Amino acid sequence: MLAVGLWAAQLGGRARWALPACFLGVMVTGGTFATLGWTLPMAEGLVLTSVFVLGLLLMTAVRAPLWLAASLTALFAIGHGQAHGAEMGASATGLAYASGFVVATAILHGLGVAVGLAAQRGRPLRPVPWLRFAGVAVVLAGGAFVVAG
């Protein structure tokens, strides 16, 4: 979730708000579908893929057009929403559960955007070494998830 915010900040412009908003909306949709019984094959694999891809995008400072960045973000969000919806316990109420993961995700996106913008202060539209290092850290975290199982 931090990586979505960091990449949005790295892209700048409308991406700063569009990517997090897109992610939240599509994640809620994926979660809703999961609670209604719709299953996305390999949702956990899509979540893991999102960690690696977002880390690589940060690392390489890819300047994707907004439509492509939003499409990729939406693809990852549907997997995250599916995973959240599928993990909802029988005793949880849908609205309370969804509110929790949406608010937590929004906070992490906002933190990523804020940190990304702070790192770029005075260096607009130029790859910032710190953000590239953050991409390396995200990829390494994905590797740790694989090892941990």
Image (cartoon, rainbow, N blue to C red):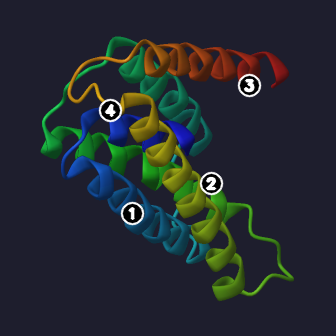
- Which quadrant of the structure image shows residue 140? top right
Residues under numbered marks 3 and 1 in contact, where contact means CB atoms less than 8 Å apart: no
Packing grade of label 4 (10 A; few <14, some 14-19, many >=20) is many
Task: Write the residue at 65% across / 63% down.
Answer: 104
Between disc 2 and disc 3, whose residue precedes? 2
Q: Secondary structure at mark 1?
A: helix
Q: CA distance from mark 3 to mark 1?
A: 24 Å
Rounded to the nearest angstrom, the CA distance separating label 2 from label 3 is 15 Å
Q: Viewed as shown, does residue 147 lie left or right of 132?
A: right
The crowding category of the residue bearing disc 2, from other C-alpha atoms within 10 Å (few below 14, some 14 to 19, many at least 20), is many
Question: Which residue lies under the disc numbered 3?
Answer: 145
For disc 4, the marked residue is 10
Distance of label 1 from label 2 (alpha carbons):
13 Å
Counting from the top left corner in percent of width and height, residue 41 is at 52, 45
Kind of residue at badge 2: Ala
Is residue 96 shown above or below 8? Answer: below
Viewer-side label of 2, 3: 3
Per the image, the residue denoted by label 2 is 83
- Percent x, y for residue 4? 44, 42
Q: Is residue 57 above or below residue 12?
A: above
Secondary structure at numbered mark 4: helix
Q: Quadrant of the C terminus?
A: top right
Q: Residue at the spot x=18%, y=39% of the render?
A: 68
Q: Please name the residue that numbered disc 1 is placed on.
A: 26
Disc 3 versus disc 4: nearer the observer: 4
**4 vs 2, front mark:** 4
> How far is mark 4 from mark 2, CA to CA?
27 Å
